[in-house]
Image (tube, grey):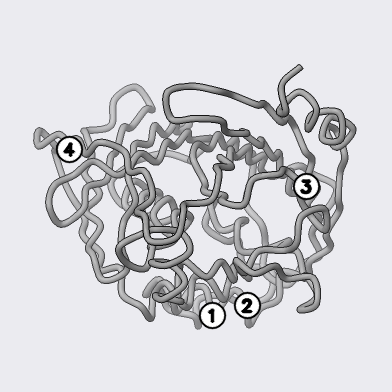
């Protein structure tokens, strides 16, 4: 029996556990989110329907400062399973949208540990954690968000983290939208999502402890901007999307979202960095 099999003895009972977080979807929180993405905050009043992907700003865990670990995440076992690997990064995401939150009305987020899978391959041992977040308001389920996180071993001091081989993004797009991933935008996004992972703001830690060459732009921010761009070029009501992040972006870089022409209620978009390297892909579906 491998060490990963032994670890799963402690991790398996976590599968199926659910934490429920209450949120008032406060009007000022909504307006702050609007301001961060250049949407007029004044257009939101109590009861206003939010954009379909804004559920990610609400139902965030409020972890005690004493429960924060050295990387800025909650200590193992406080919110997420105690997976015995120190480095965690987001990967894929699958979202179903059945409705939109309304500002100033109580909501619930149910966070379920959907699966924990140990894997071994050419890049070494990893664990893949899948979380399923269900958002409810007024007794109705409005969104189900499944996301995968990959846990890896620590990078030895002085070494660089193993990077994915860069691939050039397609250039046959019908349209594109560019956003500068500034320190200020990353800071505001991390504040809205209560994300204290130090790779987004502590350069010394990022380089010396996690082996990245620069501050890492928030992957959740990239996904949000991809949906923003898609909504600006699509017709119909968003019903779901799947996302795969394939290469990191750095704070100070730019994100260019490129997209095809919408067809039969479906739209494919992808993201490139300032060098044209593919960073993420997204497929969205719309009801006409």
When the figure is inspected, residue 203 is found, relative to residue 249, above or below; the finding is below
Dividing the picture into quadrants, the one containing residue 14 is top right
The furthest residue to the top: 1
Horizontal side, residue 160 vs residue 201: left or right:
left
Instruction: Measure the alpha-carbon separation of dots 4 and 3.
Output: 36 Å
Dividing the picture into quadrants, the one containing residue 47 is bottom right
Look at mark 4 in the image and give the residue it sits on: 169
Which mark, residue 117?
none
Q: Nearer the viewer, residue 105 or 279?
A: 279
Q: Mark 4, mark 2: which one is toward the viewer?
A: 4
Which mark, residue 82?
3
Q: Nearer the viewer, residue 136 or 58?
A: 58
- Residue 15, percent across and down? 83, 32
| Quadrant that contains the N terminus | top right
Among the two numbered marks 4 and 2 on one chain, the one whose residue lies closer to the N terminus: 2
Q: Secondary structure at mark 4?
A: loop
Instruction: Measure the alpha-carbon separation of dots 3 and 2.
Output: 31 Å
Q: Secondary structure at mark 3?
A: loop
- The residue at the point 61 percent across, 63 percent down is 57
Look at mark 2 in the image and give the residue it sits on: 29
Q: Mark 4, mark 3: which one is toward the viewer?
A: 3
- The residue at the point 78 percent across, 32 percent down is 7
Q: Residues within 10 Å of mark 2 (few under 14, many from 20)?
A: some
- Residue 78, percent across and down? 83, 58
- Residue 115, percent across and down? 73, 29
- The residue at the point 39 percent across, 32 percent down is 283
């Amino acid at each position: 029996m491998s060490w990963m099999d032994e670890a799963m003895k402690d991790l398996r009972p976590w599968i199926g556990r659910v934490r429920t977080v209450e949120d008032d979807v406060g009007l000022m929180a909504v307006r702050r989110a609007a301001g961060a993405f250049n949407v007029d905050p004044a257009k939101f009043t109590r009861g206003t329907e939010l954009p379909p992907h804004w559920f990610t700003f609400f139902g965030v865990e409020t972890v005690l400062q004493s429960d924060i670990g050295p990387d800025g995440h909650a200590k193992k076992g406080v919110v997420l399973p105690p997976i015995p690997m120190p480095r965690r990064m987001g990967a894929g995401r699958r979202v179903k949208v059945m409705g939109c939150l309304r500002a100033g009305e109580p909501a619930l987020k149910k966070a379920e540990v959907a699966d924990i899978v140990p894997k071994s391959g050419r890049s070494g041992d990893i664990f893949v954690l899948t979380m399923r977040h269900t958002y409810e308001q007024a007794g109705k389920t409005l969104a189900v968000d499944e996301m995968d996180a990959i846990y890896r071993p620590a990078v030895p001091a002085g070494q660089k983290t193993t990077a994915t081989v860069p691939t050039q993004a397609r250039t046959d797009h019908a349209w594109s939208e560019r956003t500068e991933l500034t320190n200020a935008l990353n800071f505001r996004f991390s504040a809205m999502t209560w994300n204290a992972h130090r790779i987004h703001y502590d350069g010394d830690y990022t380089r010396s402890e996690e082996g990245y060459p620069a501050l890492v732009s928030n992957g959740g921010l990239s996904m949000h901007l991809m949906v923003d761009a898609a909504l600006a070029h699509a017709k119909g009501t968003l019903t779901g999307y799947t996302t795969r992040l394939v290469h990191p972006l750095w704070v100070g870089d730019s994100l260019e979202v490129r997209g095809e022409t919408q067809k039969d209620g479906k739209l494919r978009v992808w993201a490139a960095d300032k060098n044209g390297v593919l960073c993420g892909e997204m497929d969205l579906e719309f009801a006409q």
